[in-house]
Amino acid sequence: MKDVTCPKCSKTQRVFCVRTSYSCNSCGHLWSDDVVPEPVKPTVPNYDIIGPLGDLTPTQVGLIEAGKVYSGAHVCESEIHPLLMEMATRHANYQAKRNTQGHQLFQQRAEELMQTMGRYAYAEICAESWEWQEHDTMLALGHECFKCWEQSPGHWSVASKKHKYFGADMAKGSKGIWYGCIVTADLK
């Protein structure tokens, strides 16, 4: 036997210990001892540890420099943002690790950015090289990304305009294919 207190009327009653669901004898309120676990929220990395943007990697420089000279591309005229650089690097590595180009988990990245950067409109463009380009220069690989994006109206709508912020990077998969990613943020 145990005593339980109604959460609604605060009256106490004695019940058998094996029960986990109760009905108050005074007010009829139903309640349970079963604790429903809170949904697990995704862990948001502490981006404060990234600090100010330091030196760019050769892969970042290759993609950004290609964007600065590619005719009609203006995305690399945007302001570089360290969080977006981190996201672009993360997704380029994700694609390379899986040897698959795409926008996998973009909504999750956008929600993570929303929690850390705030309410911006986020966009992402991705591309991949050809297998024979495995040993090309970073600039040539970056040029190939922009060439691919120009063929896709959706991707080119991001690559062809200047945004508030952007981040960019490339990574090589185990099959010699390079994967590029640019993430942008604009004021809503």
Image: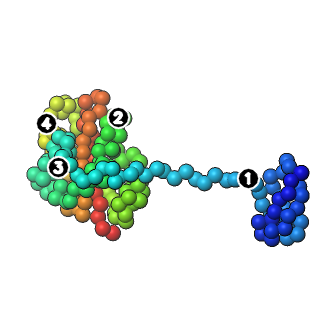
Q: Distance between the residues labelled 4 and 1?
A: 61 Å
Coordinates of residue 70 in the picture (x, y in percent):
12, 51
At label 2, the amino acid type is Lys
* Residue 107 lies in quadrant: bottom left
At label 4, the amino acid type is Thr
Q: Is mark 4 on a helix, strand or loop?
A: loop
Residue on which the image places disc 2:
97
Q: How far apart are marks 2 and 3 (CA)?
A: 22 Å
Q: Which mark is residue 137?
A: 4
Residue 149 vs 163, above or below: the answer is: above
Q: Is mark 2 on a helix, strand or loop?
A: helix
At label 3, the amino acid type is Ile
Q: Which residue is pictured at 19% across the width and 46% down the height?
A: 56
Coordinates of residue 106 in the picture (x, y in percent):
39, 51
Q: Which residue is pictured at 24% across the width and 63% down the height?
A: 164
Q: Earlier in the sequence, mark 2 or mark 3?
A: 3
Q: Earlier in the sequence, mark 4 or mark 1?
A: 1
* Residue 176 lies in quadrant: top left
Residue on which the image places disc 3:
64
At label 1, the amino acid type is Asp
Query: Closer to the camera: disc 1 or disc 2?
Result: 1
Residue on which the image places disc 1:
34
Q: Name the one closer to the observer, 61 or 27.
A: 27
Q: Decide: marks 2, 3 in contact (CB < 8 A)?
A: no
